[in-house]
Amino acid sequence: MCIGDELLIGQTINTNAGWLGQQLNSIGIRVARTTVIADDKHEIRAALDELSARSQLIIITGGLGPTKDDITKKTLCEYFESTLVVHQPTLDRVTEFFASKNIPLLEMNKQQALVPANCTVVDNTRGTAPGMWIEKSGVVIISMPGVPYEMKGIMDDGLLDKLKLHFNQPDIVHRTILTMGIGESMLADKIIDWEDSLAEHNIRLAYLPSPGMVKLRMSGYEVESGEKLNAVLDTKEAELIQLVGSYIFGHGKETLEEIVGRLLSKNNKTLSIAESCTGGNLSKLITSIPGSSQYYLGSVTSYQNEIKTNLLGVKSALIAEKGVVSREVAEQMAMGVRSLMNADFALATTGIAGPEGGSPEAPIGTVCIAVAGPSGVESATFKFGINRHRNIEMSSNTALNMLRKEILGSIAC
Amino acid sequence: MCIGDELLIGQTINTNAGWLGQQLNSIGIRVARTTVIADDKHEIRAALDELSARSQLIIITGGLGPTKDDITKKTLCEYFESTLVVHQPTLDRVTEFFASKNIPLLEMNKQQALVPANCTVVDNTRGTAPGMWIEKSGVVIISMPGVPYEMKGIMDDGLLDKLKLHFNQPDIVHRTILTMGIGESMLADKIIDWEDSLAEHNIRLAYLPSPGMVKLRMSGYEVESGEKLNAVLDTKEAELIQLVGSYIFGHGKETLEEIVGRLLSKNNKTLSIAESCTGGNLSKLITSIPGSSQYYLGSVTSYQNEIKTNLLGVKSALIAEKGVVSREVAEQMAMGVRSLMNADFALATTGIAGPEGGSPEAPIGTVCIAVAGPSGVESATFKFGINRHRNIEMSSNTALNMLRKEILGSIAC
């Protein structure tokens, strides 16, 4: 149960529910339902009534801040007919927190240390609002702040372990295989018999499309033994690789930027990037990986032709002849940034992300991508769609996958 | 009602619910609850029973794909005791779609054109699964694909207008004011009397903290006239500016990158960026805005010292003396990229994003940011936290806000 008007009106995207689902799933707790409601006493009470009747565990996030619109704690206290009492360790922590930052401690900050008498406090070391664990008629109710950073901290710091111990469930096993370069229905058609064969092992299959990719997720339920199930999943995965292996680029929660980073790091190779239509997104993805400074040298974002010619050495005549959105320009950008930064591999993108700037030769969504490496340079032209953000995302993923193949090819050589 | 195992186990973040909330809110429809459930016939039926009893409108997303795990359409058909019939315009569209892409049309693609006989088809021009509008006992039930790009297209292409016409509600008025550089409780303390004064106008206030920012949202309900309410909100906003104006940077759904882009564009000024710890994220944010090529020249991401010295002209001696994470190096980076790209303004970041790389002088979370403009260069050092992604986000927002102030200051001069 996620509480917050801002979630319902879409001012804030609810990332907590999904993250909690992942964590709970990993300890065998199946999330049957996620409910988002308003910061409203009656809504909270009604949802507690409904959810208590159908669940053994209710996790609540949100509404624990110090300000007047935060009513979760008071409502829980009334609902469970308890009273608010001071939790001294929390008060000490809050006092120290404000002192260390040289910020005056306000009355509303002190009230953060009040908790219902019937709860067990779950420590929050990253913020002032403590988590709460309440048990009533066999149902566990947990209340945590809605700030993702604090909520995740509470879970990581021990709450997840405590839940695992309390509920003691066999783990649910998921196996996800990541594909790129083939559409959902074409993929389904290629693996139709394989998909049918999963049923006898109680394995469910889901297709998860995202820009440029389709993720295939096998889920094992009703297991006698995790070991046996894992063996079955290994077999099924091997069969899948036989069928559509050339489209598979990774597994599980891996991202292309992680896979590429691992390949570069393992082979002691370096990378530089020249971006036009992706505008920095490729560099952002690469550097989102901790430790990327080991293999990443840097990038040039050239949003103007002069930067392409002056910094990356793309010939003005080539731009005039082939157009700035051309495989030739992409290739010169890649070779240019590779030599500028003295890198082993380099990526380059040039295209029309939209919504403006299209032409008959290069309509919106036209993107040229080049990858340069020790064995030369390769490039391709793609026709994506009309949505700017989607075009940037598709271009970035496609570029990373081209780089992945180039590194693998060059290692094999 | 969002249907999808991938949402419950957190493999996909549910962005549809929030987006729909925004859209519905804008036509005066209050979203009372968001429910996420599994691709499971019994769960779907149970949720339909519950939601029909409490709502006048149920919007369903997900489970309309061509593959076997997609069961929403079949379940809806059974639930409403209808039968599946071919919707010829959809079949024609699907056939044409596959022909235009030179992909063979499979049997499962043809089945996308089957819809329950009791529904009105809502066109989906971006994918193969049509939307559906069903009315039963005074409740409107809408079913749409879960792919955000398709779902948003259906809403934008006419469904939202149709809903507005059907429900004919007075609009709910929100007014959001964006602040940066002051904590939630300190802000609340400064505006305590002002906040109390909102109640008499039936205005609710919410505090929405996000990394480095607090958004204040006033919501007007139970309105006689939108005009009168807007006048009250104008007055209240003017009062708020008196109290905490120096922390306010924007309004509504504006982002810092939009505000900065607008300032640059309006004043015919250009921007270049040198990024170290933000790794491309600043450039990505700037170029996420359509039309940014008008004022954005480009960036250098210098993830290695050599790039800082060779490309940006930072003196090696300075790095040795002051450390690469220093205001002095940030300033040279900003001035370097400003002159390299011949820009009016330039931003630079250098810091330790973590989780590795900290030192006693510059622990993880230390970030130096510089902004250079026609009137010189300014810089500051910040101490953020231990989380890599949060540090990158906080650094980017802080840098954009420094740029905003610098542009405003230079225009005023």
Image (tube, coloured by chain):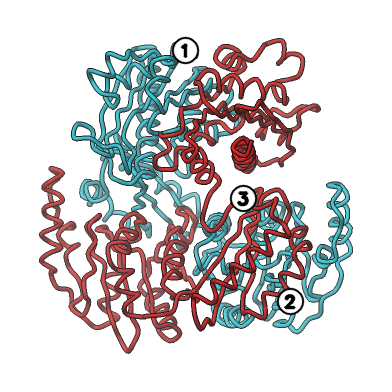
Chain colours: A red, B cyan
Front in this rendered view, residue B19 or B354: B354
**B148 is higher (above) or lower (below) than B360:** below
| Image coordinates for residue A211, horizontal then vertical, percent | 64, 49
- The mark lying in front, picked from 3 and 1, is 3
Quarter of the image for residue B135 reads bottom right
**B246 is higher (above) or lower (below) than B92:** above
- The mark lying in front, picked from 1 and 2, is 1
Residue of label 3: A249
* Crowding near the residue tagged with mark 3, few <14, some 14–19, many ≥20 C-alpha atoms within 10 Å: some
Quarter of the image for residue B407 reads top left
* Crowding near the residue tagged with mark 1, few <14, some 14–19, many ≥20 C-alpha atoms within 10 Å: some
Of the two numbered discs 1 and 2 on the same chain, state the one appearing first in sequence. 2
Q: Which mark is residue B340?
A: 1
- Chain at numbered mark 2: B
**Amino acid type at image mark 3:** Phe
Marks 3 and 1 sit apart, C-alpha to C-alpha, by 39 Å
**Amino acid type at image mark 2:** Lys
Front in this rendered view, residue A297 or B58: A297
Whether pointer 2 and pointer 3 mark residues with C-beta atoms closer than 8 Å, the reply is no
The residue shown at (40%, 31%) is B400
Marks 2 and 3 sit apart, C-alpha to C-alpha, by 33 Å
A120 on left or right of A323 = left
Q: In which quarter of the image is the C terminus of chain B?
A: top left
Residue of label 2: B74
Q: What element carries label 2?
A: helix
- Chain at numbered mark 1: B
Marks 1 and 2 sit apart, C-alpha to C-alpha, by 61 Å
